[in-house]
Image: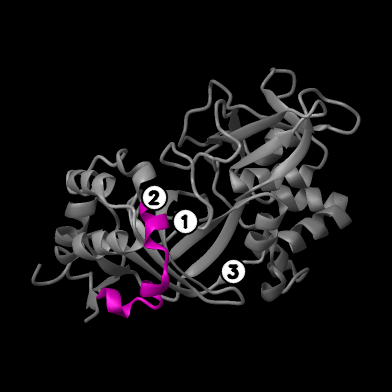
Amino acid sequence: MRVLLQALGLAWLAMTGRPDPGSAEVLTFAELDGWHHDDHRAALVAFRATCDTMTAPEWGPLCRLAAANADTDAAARAFFELFFRPLVIGDPPALFTGYFEPELAGSPTRTPRFAYPIYAKPPELTEGSPWYSRDAIESGGLLRGRGLEIAWLDDPVDVYFLQIQGSGRIKMPNGEVVRVGYAGKNGQPYRSIGQELVRRGSLTADQVSAPEIAAYVRANPGAGSRLLAHNPSFVFFRKLANLAADQGPIGAMGRSITALRSVAVDPAYTPLGAPVWIEKDGQAPIRSLMIAQDTGGAIRGPQRADIFYGTGSGAGSAAGSVKDGGRMVVLLPIDQAYALMPDG
């Protein structure tokens, strides 16, 4: 039975410290479409990767049990079914998008070809406090000459989308690959340039995708630069040392994330580290258990998730066209899930 959490708003806030999501429903695992066909062992491996960083007391015993769980799919599925309950938070349909770790050509120094920098975080920037906008940083040359350049790329569109993805691999002319990850942002609001193109009539809503946006900006250099400046949010990077080539980028929990097993969520509604059952519709449906291990500036609301598709151009092609509905179901420890119900 779906219950309105307006009546339970105080209980939700007291237990989670998060805004009232509007509604919630506890399901059975039999109600999860495709649950029995997933690779639960792969989900358990991803869950273990970040479980020890979760500090809430109800997660500690579960993490110890996960570490001791037998490495078979049947045992992994039994672990999730025994200690969790599926909870739909908010009102579907969900909105699913995708992201990836791009592989880009770059240079450690500015050259005629590589003229567009990515920056380390300025020491005076305080996370969460508003700072200068994208336009002031890029067009105004605010950071020029301060030695904060990590690398230089050959395309401003690649710089912009690297900031959207939050991580990347940059191949230098000598063959060295530098891994970079999120270090902070300027505290300005995120504004979708895809939505702005729709507002202007340049694209229709069903045309908006990362490849279409990139093509528009490259085909219209002047107007394209002004379009990128429409989003005042700006992301700074750091080099990721000692990260093996077969490991994914670092997510919001400080650990590597896993292709098609890690998802970015709004932590105001979904606890970081929690398992999340994804029922994504569209041209490439997904029915899979993922782990909430990342966040994103555009990921807001209880039924909003960004699926990590992996590294490279193939992952980028798959992720760039995802804008699908469906349902997002969070797996919470049993006591926590039932505490949200009227008789809990």
Instruction: For marks 1 and 3, give the one nearer the viewer.
Output: 1
Tell which circle, 1 or 3, labels the residue nearer the N-terminal end.
Answer: 1
Identified at 22% across, 43% down, the residue is: 64
Query: Does residue 40 belong to the magenta stretch?
Result: yes
Looking at the rendered structure, the secondary structure element under dot 3 is: strand
The mark found on residue 261 in the picture is 1
Q: Which residue lies furthest to the right in this view?
A: 112
Residue 109 in view here: yes
Circle 2 residue: 45
Instruction: Indicate which disc residue 323 carries.
Output: 3
| Region in magenta | 27-46
The quarter of the rendered structure image containing the N terminus is: bottom left
Quarter of the rendering containing residue 182: top right
Depicted 102 relative to depicted 301: above or below: above
Verify whether residue 161 appears in magenta: no
Q: Specify which label sits upstream in the sequence, 3 or 2.
A: 2
Q: Distance between the residues labelled 1 and 3?
A: 18 Å
